[in-house]
Image: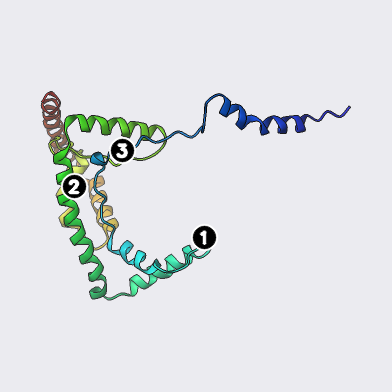
């Protein structure tokens, strides 16, 4: 005997939103906690290329089918610009970045310990929902300790610096793999000393 189980299941689905509303729910979607305007950090300026990209997208009809091709052509156009033409966008980026640094410093200086606590709570709520929240660096916080390889990298960077950063890091990593155990221990000792420095400073920072 045929039993219309699918029809019954579909019908019950139709009444599910009503049942949800009757229970007092308006939406199952979690709401991200709002951020006080005072606690909102200034936005970093966009790069020279993104500025160029934005200017070339203005007043152009863009659809999902054309945006990839259009972005590719804008990238090719950027690569064909002369250094002088690129400099216009690079100078604008530098000018806005200097303004951003001033605004960011003023923003950090205006925060109280209570503000940092509020921001930590907001960041935790955002993270629980899979959303990212900009981290704020307290200028009074101790500098993070360096690893043995990090110290080695800083020491060798000028020696191996090239136009391509990937090649620079590849050469440094290659030398790191080839150094003697005695040399490696030297950097490990430096890292241990830096870790001890950080542990001491972070205790004083948290105590104060």
**Marks 1 and 3, how far apart in space?**
32 Å
Residue at (14% x, 32% y) in the render: 198
Disc 3 versus disc 2: nearer the observer = 3
Residue 128: percent from left, percent from top: 39, 32
Q: Which residue is mark 1?
A: 64
Q: Secondary structure at mark 2?
A: helix
Q: Quickly name the residue at label 3.
A: 35
Q: Is residue 108 left or right of residue 2?
A: left
Badge 2 local density, few (<14 within 10 Å), some, or many (20+)? some
Q: Residue 160 occupies which quadrant of the picture?
A: bottom left
| Residue 67 location (% of width, % of height) | 47, 63
Residue 62 to residue 138: above or below = below
List the single residue furthest toward the right: 1
Closest to the observer, 14 or 127:
14
Task: Provide residue 3's location: percent of width, then percent of height.
Answer: 83, 28
Residue 135 appears in the rendering = yes
The quarter of the rendered structure image containing the C terminus is top left
Q: Which residue does the image show at 48% across and 35% down from the upper left?
A: 29
Left or right placement of residue 120 versus residue 21 in this view: left
Q: Which residue is mark 2?
A: 104
The tag earlier along the polypeptide, 1 or 3, is: 3
Dot placed on the residue nearer the N-terminal end, 3 or 2? 3
């Amino acid at each position: 005997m045929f039993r219309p189980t699918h029809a019954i299941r579909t019908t019950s689905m139709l009444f599910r939103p009503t049942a949800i509303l009757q229970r007092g729910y308006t939406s199952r979607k979690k709401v991200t906690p709002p951020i006080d305007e005072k606690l909102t950090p200034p936005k970093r300026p966009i790069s020279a290329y993104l500025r160029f990209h934005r200017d070339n997208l203005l007043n152009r009809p863009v659809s999902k089918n054309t945006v990839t091709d259009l972005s590719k052509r804008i990238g090719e156009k950027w690569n064909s610009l002369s250094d002088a033409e690129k400099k216009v966008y690079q100078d604008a980026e530098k000018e806005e970045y200097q303004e951003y640094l001033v605004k960011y410093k003023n923003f950090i200086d205006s925060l109280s310990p209570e503000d940092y606590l509020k921001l930590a709570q907001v960041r935790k709520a955002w993270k629980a929902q899979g959303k990212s929240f900009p981290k704020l660096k307290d200028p009074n916080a101790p500098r993070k300790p360096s690893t043995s390889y990090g110290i080695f990298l800083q020491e060798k960077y000028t020696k191996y610096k090239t136009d391509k950063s990937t090649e620079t890091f590849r050469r440094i990593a290659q030398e790191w793999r080839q150094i003697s155990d005695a040399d490696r221990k030297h950097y490990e000792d430096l890292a241990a000393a830096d870790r001890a420095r950080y542990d001491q400073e972070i205790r004083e920072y948290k105590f104060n």
